[in-house]
Amino acid sequence: MNPDRTVSPPSDAHCPACERFIGPAPACGYCGCDARRAPLRRALRLGALVLALAGLGFVYLLARRTGPAPVAVESIRPTMNYAALNVAGSVAGRPYVKRVRGRVDYLSFTLDDGTGRLRVAARAPVAGQLVDRGLLPRKGDRVQAAGRVHVSAYGRPSLYLMSARHLQRLTRPEAASRGGPAT
Amino acid sequence: MTEAALTICLSLAGACVGGLLACVPGLHVYNVLALLLAAWHAPGGPAAGTLSAWAFLPLAGAMVTAYAVLNTLPAILVSAPDESTLFTVLPGQRYLLEGRAPEAVSLTAAGSAAGLCMVAVPGALLGPRWLPALHAVLRPHMHWILWCIIAFMLLSEWPRGGTTGQGGWRRLADGWRSVGAGLLTFLLSGLLGFVLIYRSPIAHAAGFQNLMPAFVGLFTLPWLVLNALAPPDASAPPDARAPPLPAEPVGGAAWIKGIAAGVAGGGLAAFLPVVSGGIGGFLAGHATALRDDRAFLVSQGASKSVYYAGGLLLFAMPGLYLPRGGGGHMLRGVCAPGTWNDYHALLASVCIGGAVSLAALAPLTRALLRLAARLGCRRLSLLAAAVAVGLVAAVTGLPGCLVMTAAAGIGLLPPVFGSRRMNALGVILLPMACGMSGVGERAAAALGLF
């Protein structure tokens, strides 16, 4: 029986060999025993580290293989709220552009894919990039838009572009109207 | 049935459901709300015309409030907290081991009751007058406020080792272990958040529950796994039939300090985007330098009730309509409150939910203690883990399980390396702070997510 140990039972703060109090020291100062944490805790530390790094790596690889899902507007449901979707269709009207102190703060236009209509929108700074790079579509343009979908309480879906590169013009019909953006 | 009677009936039903859900360790009310939402929109479900979407407002209000009051029970009695009750575990554990768990539960519930009173009376009366203006003023500044909170969170992590032994690399590593683990947890959870927000592997049909697997993995599973691995004597609950020990008196100053800190923290968390109840409680605890365990438990109870109930009320507050937290964002897809009538119905449901849950507190405490004594905390934790994993698998499928597993690895880092679990909130803090600062797209592109 060790005379140093009076009340508390052996714990992480005691040497596993001589049971003297050693605090958080990695080796016992009395008998020199390797007193690092219990094997289960050591295994847990290693396991957690491996699981975190490997798991994150696998999630990243899986995400790289999964792009925004192509869907038809009529199939968008409220349970898809915040999902990344990809919709292709024709621009149904002149885009609306809102400027605040001369800077583009917001833009939106309606997209019609033949099954339904969807509002495609972008906030600053994405909206500003679209205007600056001349990527703003015109009425009648066929475009492909990818972004995060928001479905309102009334069931109306909106697609928010996360990046300027997520709006691609597929074709521009000759007969398309030449109306500029409404502000 | 009149609208008032319908509000009362739905609120009572919501309070009962929310109260029972709160007693299941590891089960979050938002997960069940999401399932209700999915059922609501299912073909032939209530959304098809059998029940007005408005009914969801009082139902959810009472459910969330009852959950906010009663989730103290698994946090203290079974050591299985959600994110908002993280900080009640350590003092709660001490009370549990001393056989005074009901006292800890009562203190936290008293804080919750005080928090709900502050939400229902001054908050509800003054909120519609002041908060819209305050929101308009603060809106352009939210991004740097968020960065300040992140900086404070990380800088207030302190080294817990490296104080004994011979100097050298080993001691340096020992000193940096907990701080490094905290930073690593924040970074890894932030990267996971970037992946989930900018290019989620979760199926688009379950997009509304995109973050659920990550939250279950980061906060629920690590507690349950550690509970299940703990030695039997360390997780044994006290005897429910034993006579309670005399409660230590709480001074008036401690009450006032605890309630004020909790209301301030919960209010901040409810009002600011992304900031959760756990962070609100943490900020309030530091701001008021709470050292007394009893005042601390009171403050945590007040903080979470103000965060959950207050956050939901902001969604229906005339002139504001601000969806905050998971509840507001989910409700936004179902109903669009726009009148004082909606606001008052939600307020009534919060009051009814609070009253029912406080009345049910004592019997539920006894029942959970009896259940934990019969099954044992280990078995109860394993059962709860099975429920949580089953829920994630059912809603988000195999990709969700993979996300949950990775998140569980990240969530295990703080408890096994001795750093704060709150760092795992990097999963929303980092991508949202980057997004609000206008660098989210560049960061996501640099990570190869576009």
Image: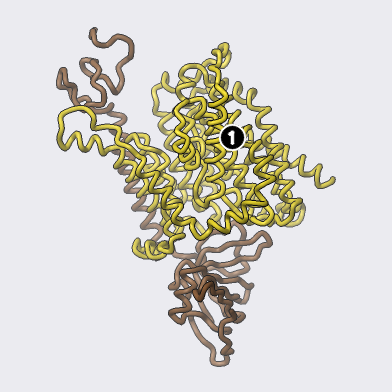
Chain colours: A brown, B yellow
Decide if residue B399 is in sight here: no
Q: Position of residue B376 (x, y in %)?
A: 49, 22
Q: Nearer the viewer, residue B432 or B317?
A: B317
Q: Quadrant of residue B113?
A: top right
Q: Is residue B161 left or right of residue B265?
A: left
Q: Position of residue B105 (x, y in %)?
A: 56, 25
Q: Nearer the viewer, residue B384 or B147?
A: B147
Q: Position of residue B336 (x, y in %)?
A: 68, 57
At x 50% / y 38%, what residue is drawn? B82
Q: How many marks?
A: 1
Q: Position of residue B315 (x, y in %)?
A: 64, 52
At x 46% / y 52%, what residue is drawn? B145
Q: Quadrant of the C terminus of chain B?
A: bottom left
The residue that mark 1 highlights is: B22
Q: Quadrant of residue B410?
A: top left
Where B405 falls versus B196 (above or below)?
above
Q: For the residue carrying disc 1, how many other residues have a C-alpha within 10 Å: few (<14), some (14-19), or many (20+)?
A: many
Q: Nearer the viewer, residue A22 or B40?
A: A22
Q: Quadrant of the N terminus of chain B?
A: top right
Q: Which residue in the rendered view is the most extreme toward the bottom? A: A174
Q: Secondary structure at mark 1?
A: helix
Q: Is residue A164 left or right of residue A28?
A: right
Q: Is residue B439 left or right of residue B138?
A: left
What kind of residue is marked 1? Ala
At x 15% / y 29%, what residue is drawn? B166
Q: Which residue in the rendered view is the most extreme toward the front? A: B253
Where B439 falls versus B215 (above or below)?
below
Decide if residue B84 is in sight here: yes
Where A88 falls versus B137 (above or below)?
below
Q: Is residue A141 left or right of residue B399?
A: right
The chain letter under disc 1 is B
